[in-house]
Image: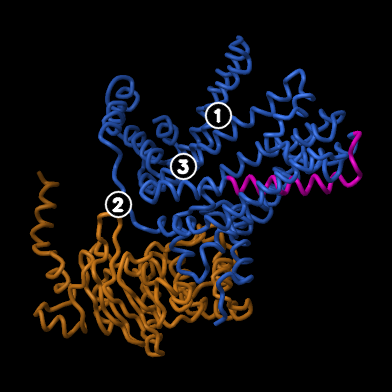
Chain colours: A blue, B orange
Amino acid sequence: MRPLAGSKLAERALQRLFLTVFLRGRSARGIRKSLTPSSIPSKLALTLLLYALVGGVALVWRKQSLFVLSTCLHAMTFVFLGTFVAASAGELLFNKDEADILLHRPVAPRTVLWAKIAVLVRVSLWLAGAFNLVGMFVGLAAPDAQLWFPLVHLLSTALVALLCTAWVVLVYELCLRWFGRERLDGLITFAQVVVTLATVLLGQAPRLLLQHPGFTRLAESSWALLLPPAWFAGLDVALAGHGGVTSWAVAALALVVTLGTSWLALGRLALSYEHGLRVLGESTSLRAGGGTRRRFIHTLATRGPGAWLLRDPVRRATFLLVLAYLARNRDTKLRVYPGIVPLLIMPFLLLGREGGSSFGIAFAGAYLGLVPMFIPTAAGMRAGSGTLQPCTCTDSADGGNIVGG
Amino acid sequence: MITLRNLRKCFGAQVAVDDLSFEVPSGQIVGFLGPNGAGKSTTLKMLTGILEPSSGTAQIAGFDVRTQVLDVKRNVGFVPDSGAVFESLSGLEYLELVAALYGIPAEAARSRIQQFISFFDLSFETLTDKLLGAYSKGMRRKVVITAALLHNPPVVFFDEPLDGLDANAAVGFKALIQTLAREGKTIVYSSHVLDVVERVCDRVLIIDKGRLLLDGEPQELVQRHQAGTLERLFTLLTGGEQLEQRAEAFAKTFKA
């Protein structure tokens, strides 16, 4: 048998695997393969088209200098990609089932990590490329742009995609290294929520920048050079504009930070990932939540309005089941919380943006009204729960009651 | 072929496997028994490189599970009790992936997969058309067993391999592991179905609370302890006494 550790064949197979799993979804119960090839590429194409349409916002900055245009494009790319990578990375990087499928195969965990990161970077590149498509050509209209700006911007966008992925992976690895295995499951969810939250909050920076009356001057002021989007814009200006020393300096900073972060995340701390994968395979003795939390939930379900709403024992049991999933089940937490965070924080951002005006309050209230849209997620959890599936109460006629519970 | 010396695994303060030592030569089928939580799956996971031992040593086909873990993995096949697979791959995609991870060229892999398909009475269409998430438990188990044997490993670990298999497939599987053992493969077979273990295995190891309680040929052990059957011996050793009385007491609670 050939020696295989790190072999090209294994690497290619793993990349193909993770890309397929990522695009089809990890769990595809009941789906026939014959249905997937037509639906997945079309869904992907639609997503890329949407990103390209949103990227049309670049037309707003068509009269700006190359540096301002590039800064805006890279800032928005950071927000979109950061959110995407943060939402996808937890499930892709640390999947419990993989221990039983992959860890006894002759493949080094580092090879597995690289394959996963390659898939994340590849999908990020597709999205970033679609989003920047319009901007690449709008940039040609900038007074100081060279003809090869689209190619240079493509390169800097690729670096942004790499940096976004490396940052998220680095956060996971550092959490693993600092906090250890005992709290791994909760920690991964926590890290993902923090990364999503940070992305949403940092995403407000370019918006505030754009709304500022002296935006052009701000974007070209020295403090703006502290922001990562400006570094990559510096790369664009250095290679495809009339770049000065400052452009070359920030371009170098972009390269150093991207390569440094990638080296740390993909090389230096990859051992933490290996440890994390093994830890996921260990059968930890899960304990039920603390007594206070359990008493609070019990009170919620048995006293006051809760007692009336949940008077049906099936509803009450379902309510407790959903709460248990939300509190203890890692996959559920990874899917639900990072998705909820932007929705919950948006009302406050809208309130802050509108300065407490009646419009802001109304808009924030409307946004909060979207929260019940997460009920289908709970329904999905019910559908995935083997505990309730055999019950007669889980048929479609009564599904509404359960979700209501 | 398999050598364990004082192998130990702790999860925090909990000791899952405690000072386990035994050897298994080539061509032997060993039943690895124990009650729930005895440490069977943890031991198998250490021997297949999924978990790292806390202390002690183990060698598979001459390779150390700590220092030569990739060599160990090349020489073992493993059917985990979870039967986990990538549900969004078709059976064929999954088996081709596994073949690629062991460096088996695509054509050779396809030919081996065909042999397993005919052995397990699977249709090629099912293997190519349906995603694994849509397979029945038994079908999925057949794919997992195929994936464990595809690279022709000298040592194979089975953790509850019959779970979900229909009667014909189970009979076929028992014949298969006996044939594999005759060809010189070492088989470690962990199961709670003791009559199958008694019929198939050359030797049984019984562990409880991470410690080895008994090691020997099934018939010889049953006779030595005057237990009548392996099942009776198992309950005597692992604290399963007075099960009939306990069952009656349990049933009475419904009448009350």
Residues marked 3 and 1 touching at CB (< 8 Å): no
Does the magenta-highlighted stretch encompass residue A166? yes
Q: Amino acid at mark 3?
A: Thr
Reading the image, the residue beneath label 2 is A285
Q: Which mark is residue A343?
A: 1
Residues marked 1 and 2 touching at CB (< 8 Å): no
**Callout 2: SS:** loop
Q: Amino acid at mark 1?
A: Leu
Residue drawn at x 64%, y 56% is A118
Residue drawn at x 59%, y 61% is A17
Q: Amino acid at mark 2?
A: Ser
Q: Residues within 10 Å of mark 3 (few under 14, many from 20)?
A: many
Compared with residue B46, is residue B24 higher up or lower down, i.e. above or below? below
Magenta region: which residues?
A: A143-167
Reading the image, the residue beneath label 3 is A189
Report which quarter residue B76 is drawn in: bottom left
Mark 1 belongs to which subunit? A
The answer as to whether the residues below labels 1 and 2 share one chain is: yes
Report which quarter residue A12 is drawn in: bottom right
